[in-house]
Amino acid sequence: MKIIKKRLSVISVLLLIVPIGVYSQEKNKIITCKKEAFAALKPLPELIYERPEDAVTESDDRILESPERLKARKEIIKELETFTDPGWWSAAVGDLNACYLRGKPGVLSAEEREQYTSEEYQVRVMGNSQIRLVLTPDPHYQNYFNGSNAYILFRKRGRVYVTEALDGYYSRLAKSISLKLYRVNSRRVVEIETVNISAMRPETAGYYFVINKATNRAIPKKPARKGRRTVLR
């Protein structure tokens, strides 16, 4: 029993040491807003609307139901559909996000690098050269809990098709949204994973979409278990 306890203690220490070392490397590595990425940079659209006068708090659902907010959401989609520049799509999302943070070409300062690599910083663009996820902060709804909307962009033959994937999303964790892209039976799958805090424990949720071959837009799908595999209905 003593040997087992000793081994467990060693494993626990290793689990603590490894993340710290990796985190230290992330903090110290050089991150650059490359000139090519900055030249291809497009300003990300903002969700602009007036908060309803009858909204009592920032968590009031009347904010979500506001006609002005609904109009602003539609404007976001229209604007993102203009993101057809090949340069923006060919630039790596890591390079774009570094430029969105810095606002000009060059190496990120120590302060900017610390912000960019921190556990609190949520990048606003994720994905690859064909499918991307763009996050848009909400200025009025759940802004203390990182309220935001998320949009899936699919690029095909010079056009961009946009689908609103998350509306009125919020989390007590700042860096809470991640993206996975893969294929299942020739279908392009977009998986958005979110993390929140429930009863002082992390709680994850997954949102699944497939790209419709006829409309080129993302369609939500419900996951189901088939043996050990996750399948989409």
Image: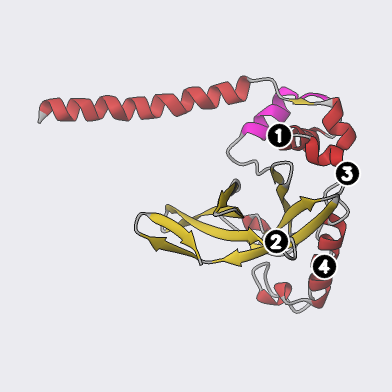
Observer-side mark, 2 or 1, equals 2
| Label 4 with label 3: CB-CB less than 8 Å | no
Q: What amino acid type should be assigned to the residue bearing mark 2?
A: Lys
- The numbered disc on residue 170 is none
First reached walking from the N terminus: tag 2 or tag 3: 3
Q: Which residue is mark 2?
A: 213
Whether residue 167 is visible, yes or no, is: no
Residue beneath disc 1: 94
Q: Which residue in the structure is indicated by mark 3?
A: 85
Label 4 belongs to which residue? 74
Find the distance from the CA under tag 3 to the CA under tag 1.
Answer: 17 Å
Q: Is residue 133 above or below residue 210?
A: above
Cα distance between the residues tagged 1 and 4: 27 Å
Q: Is residue 169 left or right of residue 193?
A: right
Amino acid tagged 4: Lys
**Is 142 left, or right, of 47 in this rendering?**
left
Give the CA distance from mark 4 to mark 3. 21 Å
- Magenta residues, start to end: 106-117
- The residue at 65%/29% (across/down) is 114
